Image (spheres, rainbow, N blue to C red):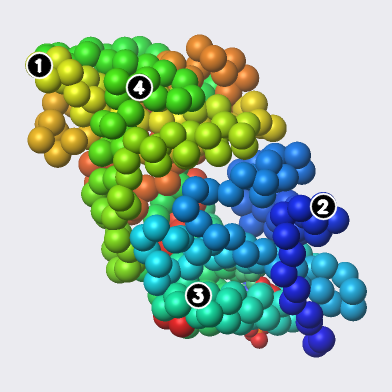
Amino acid sequence: MDIAVTPFEPSDEAALDDAYRIFAAAQAVDAPDVPAGDRAEFGLVAAHPPYGSLIHRALARHGGEAVGYLWLRLPQLENTENGLVEIFVEPAHRRRGVGRALLAYAQEVAAGHGRRRLIAEVGGVPPGVDRQAPGEAFAAAVGAQAALPMVRRRLDITRLDEALLTALHEHARSRAAGYRTVAWRGAAPEEYVADVARLEGRLLTDAPTGDLTVEGEKVDATRIRKIERFQALRGRRRYHLGAVHEQTGRLVAWTMIQAGPSTAWHAWQEITIVDPTHRGHRLGLLVKIENLRHVLTHEPELRAIDTWNAAVNDHMVSINEQLGYRAAESCADWQLTI
Ligand SMILES: CC(C)(COP(=O)(O)OP(=O)(O)OC[C@H]1O[C@@H](n2cnc3c(N)ncnc32)[C@H](O)[C@@H]1OP(=O)(O)O)[C@@H](O)C(=O)NCCC(=O)NCCS
């Protein structure tokens, strides 16, 4: 089959229209319970790329029609031998080599930038379902390894157990003497931004990384401000809750829930991290419960929160299960040596 792969710039609105159409059609089939967001949100994400990365985009065309979309991120500050890749093929045009053509293009661009491996978060199937998702079959067929098994869990807000949350909160509070909590939306208060940077910098290597080849990020307050800025420009609403060690005044635990501009019913539970020297005080549980209440006071239409965890991250998984999160999808981060 004759497939042409051509790069495009984020200022090319017609190409973005095609990319969005392909992405949304794939999402509707592969992860129908996760919202794709609307075209305007897709445009905002393209216009405001992640800090410290080069982004390459390409469309695969067959007979003039755009049928596949590639997004490739090349980190510039660390992990400079890695490329992060997403490939989407229109459901009606699958199994004709479009995915392979986009991957070959991604490998060429990545190798040209000195990258030695590609990493992709590949969606799977609900737990207990005995078949491979197309992305898993594709990743295995091209020789990638499932380097970090993950599970997506969902909290159904319409079925929250308030009495249980209150009991868990009281339990966490009783173990957290000497700590107070602080909540904010959007940008971190100036007095805590250096602590947020320290905690964010630990995240990539504190959480399990399995067989992925990744290094920690060097994060300082300036970098946090840049991240906050592009996320705000993307229209993201970010709810944060931290625990402060009263004796030192330092923020030692932090969690964040993020909602997008086009989907009021859905949000993502992102980062949760507790400074290693302050673990064992139920701070993870404490900040998560309080942040759940924080987000619900501002997001009355919220019905579901999703979160990803490494399958082996027992501690975080147990906190999430206690709060009522339930497994919705088993998936993995795949790694391919170029
Ligand atoms: C994964 C995806 C990109 C594959 O696109 P595609 O154009 O169908 O891929 P190709 O036709 O190049 O397939 C290459 C090989 O992968 C394997 N493969 C792909 N989809 C498969 C499926 N549903 N079942 C079994 N094997 C599959 C096959 O070995 C195939 O070769 P073959 O058709 O000659 O047997 C597409 O299904 C998709 O958009 N999925 C959702 C997003 C995603 O998971 N992306 C991948 C991670 S970035």
Q: Nearer the viewer, mark 1 or mark 4?
A: 4
Nearest to the observer: residue 87 or residue 47? 47
Residue denoted by label 3: 113
- Is the CB of the residue bearing disc 3 within 8 angstroms of ligand 1? no
- Residue 296, numbered circle: none
Which sits earlier in the primary sequence, circle 2 or circle 3?
A: 2
Label 2 crowd bin: few (<14), some (14–19), many (20+), radius 10 Å? few
Residue count near mark 3 (Cα–Cα under 10 Å), binned few <14, some 14–19, many ≥20: some
Task: Return the residue at label 1.
Answer: 247
Q: Quadrant of residue 18?
A: bottom right
- Compare marks 2 and 4 and give the one earlier in the sequence: 2
The spot of residue 257 in percent (x, y) is 46, 30
From the Cβ of disc 1, is ligand 1 less than 8 Å away?
A: no
Left or right of 39? Residue 333 is left
Q: Is residue 259 above or below residue 12?
A: above
**Mark 2 touches mark 4? (CB < 8 Å):** no
| Residue at the spot of label 2 | 13
Task: Report whether residue 272 is seen.
Answer: no
Q: Amino acid at mark 4?
A: Glu
- Measure the C-alpha gap from mark 1 to mark 2: 53 Å
Mark 1 or 3: in front is 3
Q: Position of residue 209 (x, y in %)?
A: 30, 59
Closest to the camera, between mark 2 and mark 3, is: 3
| Image quadrant containing the N terminus | bottom right
As helix, strand or loop, the secondary structure at mark 4 comes to: helix
Residue that badge 4 annotates: 190
